Amino acid sequence: MDRMDKLLASTGKWSRREVRELIRQGRVKVDGRPVNKPEEKVEPACAVLTVDGVTVDCTPFVYVMLHKPAGLLSATEDRKQPTVLDLLPPELRRRGLFPVGRLDKDTTGLLLLTDDGDLAHRLLSPRKHVDKVYLAQVEGRVDQGDAAVLAEGMVLGDGLRCLPAGLEPLEDGSRCLVTVREGKYHQVKRMLAARGKPVKALHRCAMGPLVLDEGLKPGEWRFLTALERSELQRLDSAT
Ligand code: URA
């Protein structure tokens, strides 16, 4: 069950203040009955909501966790190459889901797909400080010197300034965890290449509170759990 004002505002058509005004004016109805209070709860999947007699689609947004395999584009469509949307059933594709941020064609791992544009925008904003964690396999060995340089905020060859990033060498240094909070083009590969440690393989393990489900094989997906959805929403409003 969701609050009436939250639900109508989630369509993006009105602000919460505007919704409250619509309700006050008696223009909002649930199953033909006028709504009296903004905090009134309704089940969005069942109730028919109207504003001025026009039905409003309040079906909740869809959030999908996908284990992206190598070889697919993180795009909604491409005339020549398969995209991650090809892994979803037609009814989900019809909803207009899109990937939240891009992974390179050869990058594997966690990809969130949704039709919630507002959430996607907030998750991707560097100002929101949502960490993305990658497991990188490199040529050569990374060390604490590399970690110190990434932590300072690197300036890449073309003058591109990166925000401070985390690097944790693993085992003998041929693998590492890299944590970035922005999503510049080929960012992790470019940062490590600039340190003379080109990336051989890249895999995203986590994005904010979302961690790739170990039960998902490459190419498999599932809906986010209620807990994961609420963690995303909390992060969304808290930052
Ligand atoms: N950084 C990269 O270089 N590639 C990705 O796919 C994601 C982050």
Image: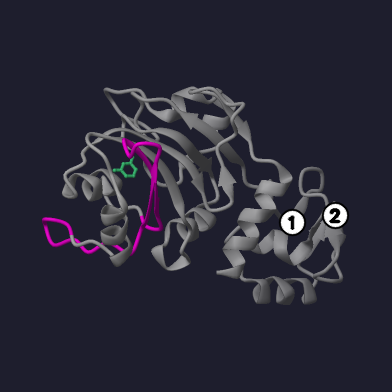
Say what amino acid the circle numbered 2 marks.
Gly
Secondary element at tag 2: loop
* Among the 4 quarters of the image, the one containing residue 237: bottom right
Cα gap from disc 2 to disc 1, whole angstroms? 8 Å
Residue 215 forms part of the magenta stretch: no
Viewer-closest of 33 and 100: 100
Q: Residue at x 24, y 46 (%)?
A: 192
233 or 131: nearer the viewer: 131
Sort mark 2 into few (<14), some (14-19) or many (20+) by Cα contacts within 10 Å: few
Q: Is residue 64 above or below residue 117?
A: above
Ligand 1: image quarter: top left
Is the Cβ of the residue at disc 2 closer than 8 Å to that at disc 1? yes
Ligand 1 under 8 Å from disc 2 Cβ: no
Q: Measuring from the top left, give residue 89's x and y in whole percent.
A: 56, 23
Graded by Cα atoms within 10 Å as few (under 14), some (14 to 19) or many (20 or more), the crowding at tag 1 reads some
Range drawn in magenta? 156-182
Question: Is 27 left, or right, of 229 in this rendering?
Answer: right
Amino acid under disc 1: Thr
Q: From the image, tell me which residue sits under label 2.
A: 32
Determine if residue 13 is in view: no
Label 1 sits on residue: 50
